[in-house]
Each structure stands twice: as structure tokens, then as C-alpha cells.
Image (spheres, grey):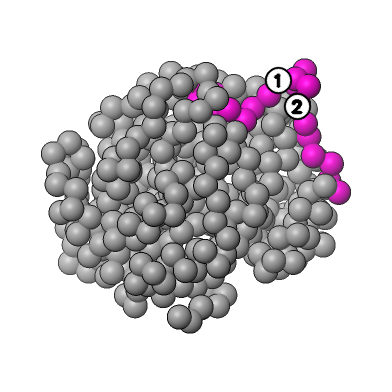
């Protein structure tokens, strides 16, 4: 998968690029890597739906506007029939990926997820159940007095197909202790991902930056992701996005578009063992997502029939499937719908 003949970049050079690198030069370098990894100018997306099964969360991250205490008037746990109805709507629109994520709810043990996932697989066998972040898996294990291995095996047996990389934020504990002190540390995040890979489950990796971390922390995050992959990880894609401060306890401002493109390009340069790089139109909007396709990204992620977490922070970009196809074509690329694991479902001609 790696670019033939390319020498591996290391931490010092990566930090220098982030601090002093010319934006357009970095973009050109990342674009060259992208074209070598993905010749033919194909840009992909998946038709998916985010189903947030509960907003009750004991983690209470300061950057999150979505979570609620159990006693809050708008706290909820979705009824299984509500979830099935949402998945049926996804399937009716040609969707192939379900992304179920929620809060770290101490009342939800593994039985809840096993029963739910079995029924989802029974009713919607063609849908990829790409759900539960490492923090959620860890929470389920603790709530159920199980090991991580036992939890992952039981979830897989029930119908969990792959694990998204949510909750990574920045994989540096000094940052995590400031913005999400009750959430698992970076080593635990990596442990879940490596164990998931050992169970044959594909995974993805993410990064949320712009919450006050140092440039060194961004670089460390990228290298820790690369090293987890080197150790046997199963990351199919990396997805960086910017912190959205609206309605959050942490507050502050978000990173600029230039910051985003620079980190995106650096991600493509550093992560030589991860095949796909997603542009975050959800946080950046369509115009910057289009530019991102020339800064290393080869994928636009999901059409997201539904998304509630980023929207809770006041970020409400939306894009239909047709708009996404038009964006790709207008940027000079070929557009294709993919599965979670990057098999092509169909290509859309100009």
C-alpha cells in the first residue's frame, strides 16, 4: 500500500513542516502521495447514517455539546424500534453503513447491544454495522464485568462488523486530561483498536484538533496512529476534523481553514501505512472539502442521513448524495459510492 520508494518521515521533520512548512508545497506533496496511492482520480463516499442511541454520558467531555446527565429533561435512550426505523430509512436510500454511537451510559450493559445488533443483522443483513468507539467498548466491558477481548468477541458474534475511531481527540494524555478527564487514555484507545484488529475487525482512526493542544501534540497523535497500525492495526482510513466550540463548556475558537488543510496534508505525508484519508465536509463545508481533495484526501466520508453530535455544537453543514457527486465532479475527479471497507458499489458518470 505504501508509496514505492518513499522514505518515511519522522517526528522532527513532521513538526518542522507543521510549524514552518509552506501550505501549497505541503499540499502538492500530499497530493502526489494521494495520486500514487489512488491513481485514476477516484474520490469515494459512503451512504450512511449516524444513529446516536443515547445522549446520557458519564464522561462529560468539556468539548462536547451533545451529552446529557441522566436526570436531564432531554436525556434519552432510543427504543430499538426507533433504531430499526432509522435503519430502514437508510436502506431505502441505498445506504450501506450504520454508525451507532452514543454516550458512556452506565445503565447499558452488553446484553443491550447483543440483542440490538442481532436484530439489526437479522433485519438488515446487507448493512455494515460500523459502531461503538473504543471508549464505548471499554465502558460496555466495565459495565458488564468483562475483558476487552470477551466484549469484542461477543459484540462481533452479535453482528458488530467494524469499529470507528471516534473519541481519539488528541492521543496525548496531557491534552486528554484537560478536555476529557473522565475518558480513557490514549493507550487504552490504542489497545481497543489493536484487539479489534486481532478479532478480524476493520477500524478507522480520527483526530479532533484545535482545542488548545500544541503542534507537538498533533504530530505525536499522527505518529501514535502510525505506530498502532505498524503493530497490527486494521485502520482503513484516517479522518481529521476541527473542534467545534459552539455550546460547549470548553468554548474558544475553531481552527482556520488553512490550519485544517495543513494538518490534512501532514496526515497524508505521515500516515504511509493507512490507505485512505477523509475530508471532513461536516466541519469544513463543501468548498473547503473540495480543496481538500488536492491536499491528500481521496474520500469524503459519509452522506450522513443523520448527524447529531457535531450539530449540537452549532455546526450544521449538510450535503445530499447528488451534491456530493457534483462536488467531486466539479473538482475534476471521478465519483464513486463505496462500502465501509472501500469496495466500490457504483461509479457515477459525468
Provide residue 293's location: percent of width, then percent of height. 34, 60
Q: Is residue 233 visible?
A: no
Name the image quarter holding the N terminus.
Answer: bottom left
Residue that badge 2 annotates: 75
Is residue 307 found left or right of 184 in the rendered image?
right
Provide residue 226's location: percent of width, then percent of height. 34, 48
The residue lying at 39 percent from left, 27 percent from top is 253
The residue lying at 28 percent from left, 27 percent from top is 214
Residue that badge 1 annotates: 69
Of residue 319 and residue 213, the one placed in the foreground of this image is 319
Q: Is residue 127 above or below residue 155?
A: below
The residue lying at 73 percent from left, 40 percent from top is 53
Magenta-colored stretch includes residue 68: yes
Crowding near the residue tagged with mark 1, few <14, some 14–19, many ≥20 C-alpha atoms within 10 Å: some
Main SS class of the magenta portion in the image: loop
Q: Is residue 36 above or below residue 291?
A: below
The residue lying at 22 percent from left, 55 percent from top is 27
Q: Tags 2 and 1 in contact by the CB under 8 Å rule?
A: yes
Amino acid at each position: 500500500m505504501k508509496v514505492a520508494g518513499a522514505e518515511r518521515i519522522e517526528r522532527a521533520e513532521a513538526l518542522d513542516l507543521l510549524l514552518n512548512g509552506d501550505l501549497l508545497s505541503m499540499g502538492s506533496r500530499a497530493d502526489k502521495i494521494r495520486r500514487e496511492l489512488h491513481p485514476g482520480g477516484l474520490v469515494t463516499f459512503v451512504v450512511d447514517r449516524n444513529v446516536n442511541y443515547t445522549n446520557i454520558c458519564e464522561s462529560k467531555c468539556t468539548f462536547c455539546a451533545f451529552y446529557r446527565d441522566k436526570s436531564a429533561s432531554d436525556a434519552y435512550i432510543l427504543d430499538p424500534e426507533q433504531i430499526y426505523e432509522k435503519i430502514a430509512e437508510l436502506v431505502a436510500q441505498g445506504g450501506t453503513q450504520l454508525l451507532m454511537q452514543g454516550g458512556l451510559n452506565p445503565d447499558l450493559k452488553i446484553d443491550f447491544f447483543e440483542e440490538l445488533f442481532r436484530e439489526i443483522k437479522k433485519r438488515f443483513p446487507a448493512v455494515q454495522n460500523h459502531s461503538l468507539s473504543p471508549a464505548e467498548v471499554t465502558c460496555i466491558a466495565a459495565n458488564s464485568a468483562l475483558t476487552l477481548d470477551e466484549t469484542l468477541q461477543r459484540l462481533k458474534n452479535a453482528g458488530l462488523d467494524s469499529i470507528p475511531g471516534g473519541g481519539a481527540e488528541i492521543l496525548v494524555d496531557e491534552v486528554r486530561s484537560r478536555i476529557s478527564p473522565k475518558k480513557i487514555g490514549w493507550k487504552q484507545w490504542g489497545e481497543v483498536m489493536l484487539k479489534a484488529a486481532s478479532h478480524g475487525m476493520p477500524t478507522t482512526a480520527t483526530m479532533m484538533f484545535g482545542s488548545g493542544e500544541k503542534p507537538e501534540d498533533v504530530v505525536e497523535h499522527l505518529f501514535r496512529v502510525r505506530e498502532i497500525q505498524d503493530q497490527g492495526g486494521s485502520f482503513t482510513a484516517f479522518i481529521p476534523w476541527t473542534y467545534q466550540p459552539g455550546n460547549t463548556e470548553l468554548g474558544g475558537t475553531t481552527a482556520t481553514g488553512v490550519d485544517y488543510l495543513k494538518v490534512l496534508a501532514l496526515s497524508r505525508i505521515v500516515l504511509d501505512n493507512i490507505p485512505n484519508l477523509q475530508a471532513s465536509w461536516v466541519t469544513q463545508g463543501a468548498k473547503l472539502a473540495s480543496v481538500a481533495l488536492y491536499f491528500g484526501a481521496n474520500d469524503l466520508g459519509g452522506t450522513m442521513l443523520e448527524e447529531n453530535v457535531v450539530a449540537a455544537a452549532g455546526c450544521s453543514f449538510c450535503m445530499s448524495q447528488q451534491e456530493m457527486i457534483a462536488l467531486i465532479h466539479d473538482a475534476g475527479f471521478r465519483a464513486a459510492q463505496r462500502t465501509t471497507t472501500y469496495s466500490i458499489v457504483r461509479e457515477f458518470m459525468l
